[in-house]
Amino acid sequence: TQVYLNGRFINQQDAMVSVMDRGFMFADGAYEVIPAFYRVPFRIDQHLARLDFSLSSIRIENPLTHEQWRGVFDQLLAENAGEHQSIYLQVTRGVAADRNHLWPKGLVPTVLVMTSPLKMRLDESLSDIQGITAMTTEDLRWKRCDIKAIALLPNVLHRQRAEEAGADEAILINEQGQVTEGSSSNVFIVKGNEIATPPKTMPILGGITRDLVIELLQAGTQYKLSERMLLQSELRNADEVWITSSTKEICPVTMLDSQPVGNGNVGPVWHDIAARYQQYKLQLAAD
Ligand code: PLP
């Protein structure tokens, strides 16, 4: 497997970073995950714009131009295995001479890009898709979850806790009893004709998949779409719950805190949006 590290394409086993890298010492960096279907990066402009936002928010200058990023992705996608791949990129503040919270001037950011084979979830007949289980848990994170920062300790602990309780994803609830997002996904609910998801004014990651789902819903459906605060009680009483992410796509949640969501089956509104998303994806691939 080839990876890109600081300007070179090398074997993954040979990719080494100093222990003095601020990513290792302080989780001082940002990342992106970009799905590539049929070896073509999906919604790449949106992902690169979010990378610019994350890096400027933590005061790291983007070390590559968008053109250069695309070139790196294309080379890795061509050389690595997988018709569909997930691109992981990480930029840290770089390697410092000593361990100090303050960063010295003139650091050179560390840049890593790698890919892994991706299972495209929504490629089979949609009626074969099974729902997943989720559990709610207290959101323990900081106030800047809009930055895609590499510091993921709370997310890791939330996800591990869910796994050990037999759930596939943790849905996070803030101190006011409101839904924020999943440990690595955004959350939507359906109730009657309304589809609702927490607004980006909350401390959540603005998911690229979330935005696409909203775009598709606004383009040609009759549902009432709301970006609004969702109470935990609304989540529990929803007809349908979905989580979205680049690698999970749009995923129906059919069990929540050991109770069925709605009637416990994958719902009709999910089928509708999943078909639209699928069509959009295949259309792009065909272009
Ligand atoms: N929220 C969090 C905390 C995430 O880590 C992720 C992605 O992994 C998402 C939401 C979904 O974002 P995207 O759709 O851009 O993958």
Image (cartoon, helix red, strand yellow):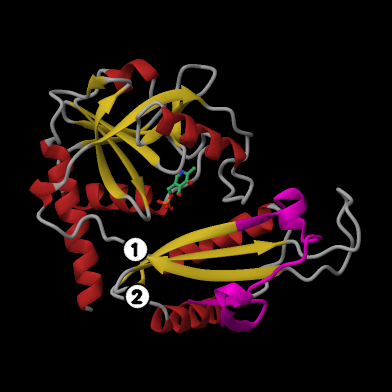
If you read the primary sequence from the N terminus, does the residue marked by circle 1 or circle 2 appear first?
2
The residue that appears at 41% across and 54% down in the rendered structure is 208
Query: Label 1 is placed on what type of residue?
Result: Leu
Calculate the distance from the C-alpha at mark 1 to the C-alpha at mark 2: 12 Å
Q: Say which residue label 2 marks.
A: 40
Badge 2 crowding class, 10 Å Cα cut-off, few under 14, some 14 to 19, many 20 or more, is: some
Query: From the viewer's perspective, is residue 239 above or below residue 188?
Result: above
Which residues lie in the magenta part? 1-30
Query: From the viewer's perspective, is residue 38 above or below residue 164?
Result: below
Q: Nearer the viewer, mark 1 or mark 2?
A: 1
| Residue 155 location (% of width, % of height) | 53, 38
Q: Is residue 50 visible?
A: no
In the rendered structure, find residue 61 and report the number of the disc placed on it.
none
Mark 1 element type: loop
Quadrant in the picture for the C terminus: bottom left
Q: Nearer the viewer, residue 220 or 261?
A: 261
| Residue 79 location (% of width, % of height) | 42, 83
In the rendered structure, find residue 118 and report the number of the disc placed on it.
1
Does the stretch in magenta take in 251?
Answer: no
> Position of 128 compared to 40: left or right?
left
